[in-house]
Amino acid sequence: MLPSCIRTVCKNQIRSNKALGLISKSGYATEATFETKPYRLHRLEQSPSTTVTLTKEDAIKYYTQLHTIRRMETTAGNLYKDKIIRGFCHLYSGQEAVAVGIKATLRPYDAVITAYRAHGWAQLMGVPPLGVLAELCGRQNGCARGKGGSMHMYCDHFYGGNGIVGAQVPLGVGIALAAKYNGTDGVCITLYGDGAANQGQVFEVYNMAKLWNVPCIFVCENNGYGMGTSAERAAANTEFYTRGDVIPGIWVDGMDVLAVRECFRFAVDFAASGKGPLVIEAATYRYSGHSMSDPGTSYRTRDEIQEVRQTRDPVTSFKEKIISSNLVPADEIKKIDAEIKATVDEATKIAKADKEIGLDELSADIYSLNLEPRIRNVDPFTHLVHKRIGPAVNFK
């Protein structure tokens, strides 16, 4: 049986594709409009628009981003099965529209922090596929020199990748508070799952964010399951967008990249204009298990997963939209697919052949400002030497 979050987005699917705007010499539309599913509101009188406009340029951009994340995650899963990737590995396949839709609305100085399902976000925020895959493999070309792995990837204005359930949420409020303190109109997108939504620290910082009117946009990616427990079995209130109490909230179809984009255009403008925090629930779905040690079929059926793939897949449904509305020809889509495959395959080849860092680098780049020359080792009698190799990411 489908969890309620995905039952909602699977029924009454709206598929209005109407090409608008100028027609190019090739006979294809340069712009199209679509209707999204209605948003649900909490303590808000105004809703994001359900009529969205998409240009050909943005259609190609979003499809490329969606498909790149999907291809990287498929590759990561295969590398894990081949025992090249070790340790924890949490795949984002099925949830790509949330990240791509949000990223489309962010300004260069807006920040993002997420949990451990971070590979796609790292790539969107600026880490190339090689930096992601090499990090997953624990190699020196990784974005954290192979020391962070799956759950700890960082780049400019992207604060990870955090392995402790729910712990990134207070950090996100702190990042947003810094933006306000520094007098900018920047916001922080703070993502967590439906499982982490029950953490006490989440409710604590809801209160602080509203009390101080912090420009933090809380995003609950509700994929229906916290590890192997469905949201209905774990939460008395599964309307996660209402959980901020006095904080306004919005429910959005997280399988539709255009609905997410329109929702976050509204949200970023809301938070950046001094109106305080928002809680967004993005109803989505993950195809893989919670992590690679979870087959993902002991608490749900294969039929359930297949139904979502066939009816609401964020990549294929968007591809069908842009082809059927004459925005992008099928031949161009095939060309994009081939280019993405070649890019990810080449990155995979380099990552597999790459070297690990030396032992002397294990104690490097621990502190942005190191006040102690010696770093504690596994015993109190021998020490390691701290050294600087690369710049401290996001330290300004």
Image: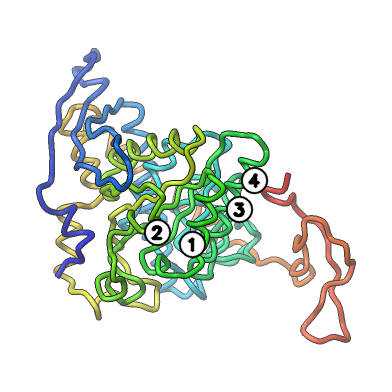
Foreground label between 2 and 3: 3
Q: What's the coloring here?
A: rainbow
For the residues labelled 4 and 3, say whether their Cβ atoms are less than 8 Å apart: yes
Q: Earlier in the sequence, mark 2 or mark 1?
A: 2
Circle 2 SS class = helix
Write down the residue under mark 2.
73
CB under 8 Å between discs 1 and 4: no
Q: Residue at x 23, y 60 (%)?
A: 5
Q: Which residue does the image show at 21% across and 74% down from the upper left?
A: 300
Q: Which residue is mark 1?
A: 115
Quadrant assignment for the C terminus:
top right
Asked if 170 appears above or below 248 in the picture, the reply is below
Q: Using the image, determine if residue 126 lies above or below residue 311.
A: above
Callout 2 crowding tier (Cα within 10 Å): few <14, some 14–19, many ≥20 = many
Callout 4 secondary element: helix
Circle 3 residue: 174
| Real-space Cα separation, disc 1 to disc 3, in angstroms | 16 Å
Task: Judge the density around disc 1: few (<14), some (14-19), many (≥20) Cα neighbours within 10 Å.
Answer: many
Q: What type is the residue that disc 2 sits on?
A: Glu
Q: Residue 383, position in %: x, y?
A: 86, 78
Q: CA distance from mark 1 to mark 4?
A: 20 Å
Q: Amino acid at mark 3?
A: Gly
Asked whether 26 or 11 is in front, the reply is: 11
Query: Which residue has dot 4 on it?
Result: 178
Instruction: Sort mark 4 into few (<14), some (14-19) or many (20+) by Cα contacts within 10 Å.
Output: some
Measured in 3D between alpha carbons, the distance from the residue under mark 4 to the one under mark 3, in whole angstroms, is 6 Å
Q: Tell which circle, 1 or 4, labels the residue nearer the N-terminal end.
A: 1
